[in-house]
């Protein structure tokens, strides 16, 4: 009878079709997303890009080529899992005009979108599914009607397939070669074994997926990744630039006369994705078609996996933004290894057109290069980083006479309270981002998150370059959370912000800091009217070792304290820290509007649950031992502290608590169930549970399994499958391509749990990757979660 019962239950599970969660959750998931904003270079227009709704399973079921870490739609020759926009709307920032872009195809799938340097045009791609092509379209603001610029098929395999030239009259595009034939077919009969060999060279690698496996894969990559470089004028005229290769990236020089071309070439790796393949760096001069080879970067399979490790030789090639045509790059002076003791870690080099002279050293750094913000011929900012102590230094220097680095700030990048923000930028005559200064050029402006013990309060600061003093222009204040999007006018102190509160959904405003006038630019409706009045609190508490912690607590709209303690759902994602004081800093704001996404835990307030979301679970090292040496102890202590505080406040029933997490959060869930008896049930989505399958590091763990086997073994809940007694729901996408979270992780963990008699359910989602995108999959996932919580919590 028991055997027949098992067969019957298996048959029932196999007969399950896609389900829907309760209507309250379904309506929230189907609510339209708020648009993405983009400000024109001249600060006169706000472009609103409205995201299409959830994909259908039929879209995910379309053919897909998976090679070299890429996922390609062979029908359009672009990314197979891209997010598209459906509508483009322009809002004037100097008047009340609103332009809804006309002329788009029905159900248009709008991809890459880019302003022209003169802010008079917008170029964008459209995936023409019916004709199997990616097309280049454009709209002139004065007309407001979109038009297809050319019938040329673009190659979107590597992402953004076009770039504006500085004159706003032409665009460089990566096109499918005009005479390309059909894709190579995979051999039905193997011609020989697939062989890999290593001759004594250390070549550690993290666990990547969708890699090249054989010669057939190499031929497919050549076919889909090969592009022909072309120039398309805004009047529709086209010109071949006579370069056809596996071009990954193009970048026109600021003056539009040259093109930086980054091309991938063989030998292709069987261990690493395409970004690590050998790269040729060339500069094409458009006028005469001449090409200067700048660098040849080898395959970097042998790099150690420590943080701050970089390849030897030149890297990070790009154009200076402040001059017509000067290339810059970085070269390590420590052999690429941060363990080597040197005074100079990196040097930035430059090479001016016509690119035939000897490169010149521009500036030397004692830390690893972290980026440059260009301003003028006498002003630039340079960032240096060091992972071992999380140090970040920001310097100012003079590119014309770079003999001195003037330190502007030095801090731990874990310390969010000391974060000075990022420099505000503006577009120059070439359409490139440069540092925003006042009319006299002696002040810079900084936009920051404003993290503090009271929550985030975004700000704008002015930095006086003469005396080095900072003064606060403006800072967000409760009951609103207001984020600067752009400084519209420095002299008049006009800024564009996005403002929200617990009850007011985000909208854009123009704020005059002199007159304090506030003008509403957008009027987006509340996407979640059913949650109006939702009670949100940030609770603060201490872990047993004294580390300060926090969590967002959500209570149902109609909750009354007299209702007593509620069943509760916890959601979290652990983070590693080097310093305990920084680990205890508060993130987020009590004034933010609800943040929902497909996998949010907040949906369950509609089902009568209290929700503890975004629990801070810092895993802290002490400077001698590594953070993960005491991962389990810190993990359990963090969650216990949160529950004790929530129970003390009277909102949470300690006998009815569930825990959920995604990816590293799923790993957390399994460990909590293995090493504590706090929870009635757990939900783990797309996790990794056996760390010996990720032996060369994971998350911020830089040691290999062979360096710290005790850490890998202790942190693997797979090793403690016999200890897990609380019911566990495992969910995983069958096409997960995230490094480390192979679908096999959930399959083998389920088998281990089942073998020890655990209450466990495994749900494998066809066609889904690490994040789930099809409406059918998302709704069914939420149904599974809701059913599990109602049954066991």
Image: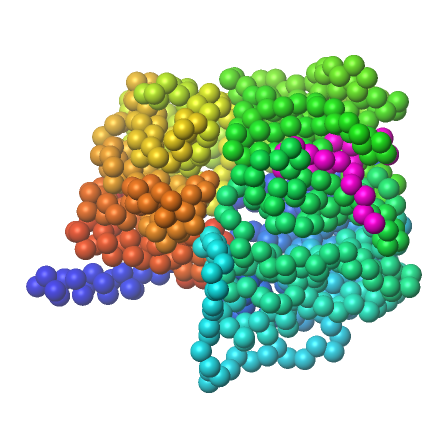
Above or below residue 251? Residue 71 is below
Q: Which residues are magenta?
A: 358-381
Q: Main secondary structure of the magenta part?
A: strand
Above or below residue 576? Residue 61 is below
Residue 555, percent from left and from top: 39, 27
Q: Quadrant of residue 754?
A: bottom left
Q: Residue at x 49, y 39 (%)?
A: 596
Q: Residue at x 60, y 67 (%)?
A: 267
Q: Quadrant of the C terminus?
A: top left
Residue 50, percent from left and from top: 65, 47
Q: Answer with left or right where residue 777 lies relative to residue 232.
A: left
Q: Answer with left or right where residue 159 lies relative to residue 239.
A: left
Q: Residue at x 50, y 47 (%)?
A: 305
Residue 386, percent from left and from top: 58, 33
- Mark count: 0
Camera-nearest residue between 222 and 511? 222
Residue at the left extreme, as displayed: 1
């Amino acid at each position: 009878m028991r055997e027949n019962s098992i067969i019957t239950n298996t048959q029932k599970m196999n007969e399950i079709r896609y389900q829907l969660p309760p209507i309250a959750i379904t309506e929230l998931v189907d609510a339209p997303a708020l648009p993405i904003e983009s400000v024109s270079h001249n600060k006169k227009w706000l472009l609103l890009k409205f995201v299409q709704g959830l994909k259908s399973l039929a879209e995910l079921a379309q053919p897909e080529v998976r090679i070299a870490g890429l996922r390609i739609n062979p029908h359009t020759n672009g990314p197979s899992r891209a997010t598209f926009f459906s509508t483009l709307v322009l809002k004037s920032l100097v008047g009340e005009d609103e332009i809804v872009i006309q002329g788009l195809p029905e159900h248009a799938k709008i991809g890459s979108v880019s302003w022209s340097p003169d802010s008079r045009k917008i170029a964008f791609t459209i995936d023409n599914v019916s004709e199997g092509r990616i097309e280049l379209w454009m709209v002139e603001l004065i007309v407001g009607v979109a038009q297809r610029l050319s019938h040329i098929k673009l190659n979107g395999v590597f992402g953004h397939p076009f770039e504006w030239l500085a004159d706003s009259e032409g665009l460089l595009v990566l096109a499918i070669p005009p005479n390309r034939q059909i894709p190579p077919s995979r051999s039905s009969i193997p011609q020989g074994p697939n062989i890999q060999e290593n001759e004594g060279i250390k070549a550690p690698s993290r666990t990547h997926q969708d890699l090249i496996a054989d010669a057939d894969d190499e031929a497919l990559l050549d076919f889909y990744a090969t592009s022909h470089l072309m120039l398309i004028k805004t009047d529709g005229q086209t010109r071949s630039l006579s370069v056809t290769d596996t071009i990954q990236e193009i970048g026109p020089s600021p003056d539009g006369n040259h093109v930086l071309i980054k091309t991938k070439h063989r030998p292709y790796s069987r261990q690493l994705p395409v970004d690590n393949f050998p790269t040729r760096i060339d500069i094409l001069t458009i006028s005469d078609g001449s090409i200067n080879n700048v660098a040849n970067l080898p395959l970097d399979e042998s790099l150690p996996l420590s943080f701050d490790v970089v390849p030897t030789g030149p890297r990070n090639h790009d154009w200076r933004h402040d001059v017509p045509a000067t290339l810059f790059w970085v070269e390590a002076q420590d052999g690429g290894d941060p363990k080597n003791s040197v005074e100079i870690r990196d040097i930035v080099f430059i090479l001016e057109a016509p690119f035939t002279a000897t490169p010149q050293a521009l500036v030397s750094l004692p830390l690893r290069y972290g980026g440059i913000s260009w301003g003028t011929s006498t002003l630039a900012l340079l960032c240096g980083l060091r992972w071992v102590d999380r140090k970040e230094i920001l310097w100012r220097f003079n590119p014309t006479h770079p003999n001195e680095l003037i330190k502007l700030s030095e801090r731990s990048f874990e310390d969010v309270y000391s974060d000075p923000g990022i420099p505000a930028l503006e577009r120059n005559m070439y359409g490139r981002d440069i540092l925003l200064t006042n009319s006299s050029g002696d002040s810079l402006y900084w936009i920051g998150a404003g993290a503090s013990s009271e929550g985030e309060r975004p700000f704008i600061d002015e930095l006086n370059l003469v005396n080095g003093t900072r003064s606060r222009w403006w800072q967000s204040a409760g009951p609103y959370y207001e984020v600067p999007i752009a400084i519209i006018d420095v002299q008049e102190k006009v800024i564009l912000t996005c403002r929200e509160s617990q009850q007011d959904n985000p909208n854009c405003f123009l704020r005059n800091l002199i007159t304090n006038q506030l003008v509403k630019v957008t009027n987006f409706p509340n996407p979640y009217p059913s949650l109006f009045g939702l009670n949100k609190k940030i609770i603060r508490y201490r872990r047993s070792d004294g580390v300060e912690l926090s969590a967002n607590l959500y209570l149902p709209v109609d909750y009354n304290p007299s209702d007593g303690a509620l069943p509760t759902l916890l959601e979290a994602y652990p983070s590693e820290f080097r310093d305990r004081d920084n680990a205890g800093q508060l993130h987020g704001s009590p004034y933010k509007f609800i943040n929902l996404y497909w996998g949010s835990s907040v949906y369950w307030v509609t089902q009568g649950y209290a929700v503890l979301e975004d629990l801070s679970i810092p895993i802290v090292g002490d400077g001698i031992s590594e953070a993960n040496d005491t991962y389990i102890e810190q993990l359990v202590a963090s969650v216990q502290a949160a529950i004790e505080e929530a129970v003390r406040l009277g909102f949470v029933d300690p006998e009815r608590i569930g825990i959920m997490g995604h990816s590293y959060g799923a790993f957390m869930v399994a460990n909590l169930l293995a090493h504590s008896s706090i929870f009635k049930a757990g939900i783990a989505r797309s996790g990794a549970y056996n760390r010996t399958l990720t032996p060369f590091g994971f998350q911020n763990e830089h040691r290999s399994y062979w360096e710290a086997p005790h850490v890998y073994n202790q942190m693997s809940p797979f090793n403690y499958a016999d200890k897990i007694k609380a019911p566990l729901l495992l969910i995983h996408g069958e096409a997960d391509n995230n490094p480390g979270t192979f679908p096999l992780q959930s399959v083998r963990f389920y088998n281990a749990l089942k073998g020890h008699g655990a209450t466990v359910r495994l749900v494998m989602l066809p066609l889904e990757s690490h994040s789930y995108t099809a409406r059918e999959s998302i709704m069914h996932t939420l149904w599974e979660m809701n059913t599990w919580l109602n049954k066991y919590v």
